[in-house]
Amino acid sequence: MVTTITSFGRSGTFDWLYQRVTAVLLTIYTFFIVGFIFLSKDFGYESWSALFAHRWMRVFTLLALLSTVVHAWIGLWSVITDYITNLLMGAKATVLRLVIELLLAAVAVFYTAWGIEILWGL
Amino acid sequence: MLKVSIYRYNPETDKAPYMQDYELDTQGKDLMVLDVLELLKAQDPTLSFRRSCREGVCGSDGMNISGRNGLACTTPLSEAARKGKLVLRPLPGLPVIRDLVVDMEQFYEQYKKIEPYLQNDTPAPAIERLQSPEEREKLDGLYECILCACCSTACPSFWWNPDKFIGPAGLLQAYRFLADSRDEATDERLSKLDDPFSVFRCHGIQNCVNVCPKGLNPTRAIGHIRHMLLARAV
Ligand code: SF4
Ligand code: SF4
Ligand code: FES
């Protein structure tokens, strides 16, 4: 058992499942948006803002945004812990990992807040 | 003439490892790589490597043969030599003790973690713990592992985190005990594997399957463990 406190769910099984669930949601969202753009007859500002006037669309978009954050965190966390290890670069890896993780967390919070602001026109 | 290039390193005399070239007259025979090493050792007694059974049973002579991990004793020159040249290096990712001899400590540490022995606290029956033929069949493709480390040292996830990721060899054995109808510690075993490293560092690239000299499939075993963990968690 390896203890980690910065992985998303702290359990490998949990992270694995969330990585897949968010991937599915993001795929559906992408297909939906691309489909909407190419299939709607007169695509433009009108139809776009009409779409986002629906509450379900805002919630769906927020879910996609949160999924992106979770998906990116799990993915990047495993990249960081693969390549920035104490085995490779000694004690400074710990500091470097922590700095990158804090940066990623800041970016995640920023985009989430900004997304909510845009979606609900706050 | 066969050209052989071998990784040499003696920490007592060499500052850095280097490749040494040898030549050998194989008299047209399709020797095993281990035979080549034995013949070269007769020329140069300082050449070091591990070996024992010379028939793919003991797992001592795992090494990197022309870029691919395998057992020297079961790999023929016809498979390993390219354009009359053979390149031998130690298993990648583990500390080198000398020449082709690596320090397997990290590999065994991971093996130890999975508690590779049957755990059953029920008093043993008078004769033996019985298994049906179907239950026994589940261990096929698992128990045959000879712990040669060819798989784990071909796995990038094991290179990056040899202290945290159990690696294909250890996980194949973990599943061997999870799948054993006589073992009662299934839940405890799974709890110990549930972190983000032990099992989940496997990204399914299957380098392990590609090199296993016994034709075993660690990736499939890892998939089974993942399903057991998932079934237990949701
Ligand atoms: S699974 Fe295959 S390659 Fe890995 S240690 Fe066992 S026998 Fe060797
Ligand atoms: S399938 Fe998994 S265990 Fe096998 S080499 Fe790839 S990452 Fe390693
Ligand atoms: S010498 Fe025993 S496996 Fe090759």
Image: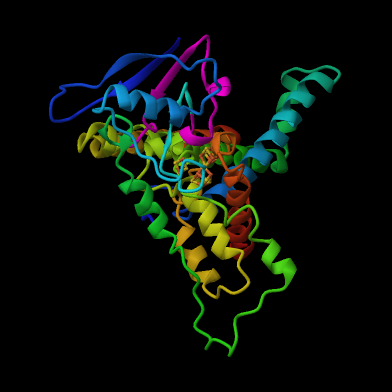
| Image position of A119 (left or right of B102) | right
In the rendered image, residue B137, in percent from the top left (x then y), is placed at 70, 62
Decide which of B72, A35 is in the foreground and name it: B72
Residue B92 is drawn in which quadrant? Answer: top left
User: Farthest residue in the left direction?
Assistant: B13
Q: Vertical placement of A87 versus B134: above or below?
A: above
| Image position of B147 (left or right of B48) | right
Q: Vertical placement of B157 versus B128: above or below?
A: above
Which quadrant does the C terminus of chain B fall into?
bottom right
Q: Residue at x 16, y 23 (%)?
A: B14
In the rendered image, residue B211, in percent from the top left (x then y), is placed at 55, 34
In the rendered image, residue B95, in percent from the top left (x then y), is placed at 28, 36
Q: How many marks?
A: 0
| Image position of B45 (left or right of B84) | left
- Queried whether the magenta region covers residue B89, the answer comes back as yes
Q: Vertical placement of A72 versus A6: above or below?
A: above
- Queried whether the magenta region covers residue A3, the answer comes back as no
Decide which of B88, B2 is in the foreground and name it: B2
| Image position of A13 (left or right of A21) | left
In the rendered image, residue A12, in percent from the top left (x then y), is placed at 49, 52
Q: Residue at x 71, y 43 (%)?
A: A56
Instruction: Examine the rendering and report whether any part of residue B8 can be seen.
Output: yes
Decide which of A113, A22 is in the foreground and name it: A22
Which quadrant does the N terminus of chain B fall into?
top left
Q: Residue at x 71, y 27 (%)?
A: A49
User: Farthest residue in the front direction?
Assistant: B27
Instruction: Examine the rendering and report whether any part of residue A5 can be seen.
Output: no
Range drawn in magenta: B69-94
Q: Vertical placement of B20 versus B141: above or below?
A: above
Decide which of A74, B57 is in the foreground and name it: B57
The structure's colour scheme is: rainbow
